[in-house]
Image (spheres, coloured by chain):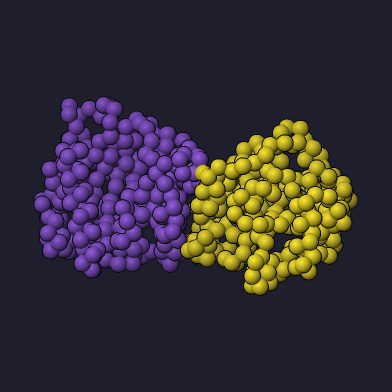
Chain colours: A purple, B yellow
Amino acid sequence: MRLTEQQFNYFRTFGFAVFRQLLTPEEVKRYSEEFNKGLDYWLDDNRRHNQKNHYALLMYETTPFIAALHGDPRFADNAEQLLGKPVIGASANGNYWWKGDTQWHPDARSLGFEGVKFVIYLEPRDATNGALRLIPGSHRPPYYHQLSRDPSEALGVRPEEVPCCVFESQPGDVLAFNLACWHAAFGGDDFRRQGVMVYYEDPQTPELTQEVIELILHAKKNAADKYGQPHWFPQYWRLIDNSHHQRWVRRLAELGVLD
Amino acid sequence: MKVMSLTEQQVNHFRTFGFVVFRQLFRPDELKLYMDEFDRGLDLWVPGGQHDRQKRHHALFTYDTTPFICSLHDDPRFADVAEELYGKPMFGLTVNGNYYVGDTQGHPDSGTAQHSGIKFTIYLEPLTAADGALRLIPGSHREPLRTELAKDPQAKFGVRPEDVPCYSFESQPGDVLAFDMRCWHASFGGSDHRRMGVVVYFEDPQTPETEAITKEKIENAKKLAASFGQTVWFTPYWRSINNLRHQRWVRRLGELGVLD
């Protein structure tokens, strides 16, 4: 899959790109089934509605289709083209969002390195029921630094009134955003399913290398402490036989972050 | 009359996103007066006295036929706010109105980084994204977004103009939006008789470079008005308004050599 120059321009300027119907209906069905299986596996008594968010890696043999998508050209090749540099697959995971809102934030803690997150919603979403909202262009300075996690205090508007665009989507649509792009969601129902594929740029300097190592170690600890996930790069994921996966595994070993 | 004093948050909003919204800035009786004068002021200049709904019409509201609208130019809700948002002296450039037809493609009003102004927009019908509400790209008044955007989004970004990511100013009559004139904006799906009033201020230029840019922009604005039959920009009525602010503007415009 080769991105057009326009898609690259769009991502670079706005900090995200939309791929309508990137997954076929058959793939959505399979993704949806594996998603539930992969997440429910980690829940006590398989209970989804217990008033909290749930998160799980989808990189085990219970979710083979989703784990393989991590190295699929529609995601891995796109990630490299969007960032214009080699990437490492960092995570394929899923979330059950319990009700409520996700407040404004960027995923990146700094602008030192770049990463891209693909998000996959399994139900139709619009502004009123939890669609992802993004502030176009907010992935770059000085805009990135001028925004606030507390818009009421900083800008005098409620979080849901912050000027933004809304990723209204149907199942099969995929949005990719720069990890530094500010985003939020409001008005979601109590069973909002969101699948995620994350890629980090392959660090080429000591500073970037240290930043990526710290990010991965932080993510591993968070997944273990908050959601009981024992592995970050499970054995099943490491053994997937494609060129992306095997290069990533070698590189992650060099970085010393494989479990 | 409500005296404006902006909060720190409103100033932050304007500086961060390039615009700020004032809901129900007009009282109902003011809105009625505004609407009456708007139609009268525009229809005077429309051939046949009635908008043909075929093409845009534009008219200055700086005549004695529209005294209320003309007085808004130095109303604190507009003039004080303009100065508070920029933190520097401004001068009143124009008060005018438009009958728009159809879409307005994406553009900034000011194409230079060095100099700007502020435009207050007043819509007289309820508008949503689907039927002509003003769309703005938040943060596009500043770099790097400002120069990366394009008037042909299909060629640069591969999307239709109406699919460019943006914020839609959905409004009710009485709401007012103020935006930095460098901020990219557009409108799609509007009716064939969309009424928009504007009140505009420019930064008072403080260097020879910005003075030259300001003069050029004023001359361009005059040419636009002339294309609609408006041959006098700073009308005698507007110049004669007897208050300190107007008279300061008139003196400054005289110094700049742009009075008609």
Q: Look at 83% across and 65% down and name the residue there.
A: B260
Question: In the visual, does B175 lie left or right of A252?
Answer: right
Across and down, in percent, residue B6 comes to 59, 43
Question: In the visual, does A241 lie left or right of A155?
Answer: left
Q: Say if residue B22 shows up in the picture.
A: yes
Q: Look at 13% across and 49% down and name the residue there.
A: A234
Q: Look at 29% across and 47% down and name the residue there.
A: A196
Question: In the visual, does B17 lie left or right of A51?
Answer: right
Give the farthest residue toward the front.
B244
**A235 or B172, which lies in front?**
B172
> Where does the N terminus of chain A fall, quadrant-wise?
bottom left
Q: Look at 15% across and 51% down and name the residue there.
A: A233
Across and down, in percent, residue A120 comes to 34, 46
Q: Quadrant of residue B122?
A: top right
Vertical position of residue A51 compared to residue B142: above or below: above
Question: In the visual, does A30 lie left or right of A61?
Answer: right
User: Count the marks: how many?
Assistant: 0
Q: Say if residue A11 shows up in the picture.
A: no
Across and down, in percent, residue B239 comes to 83, 56
Across and down, in percent, residue B174 comes to 68, 38
**A43 or A144, which lies in front?**
A144
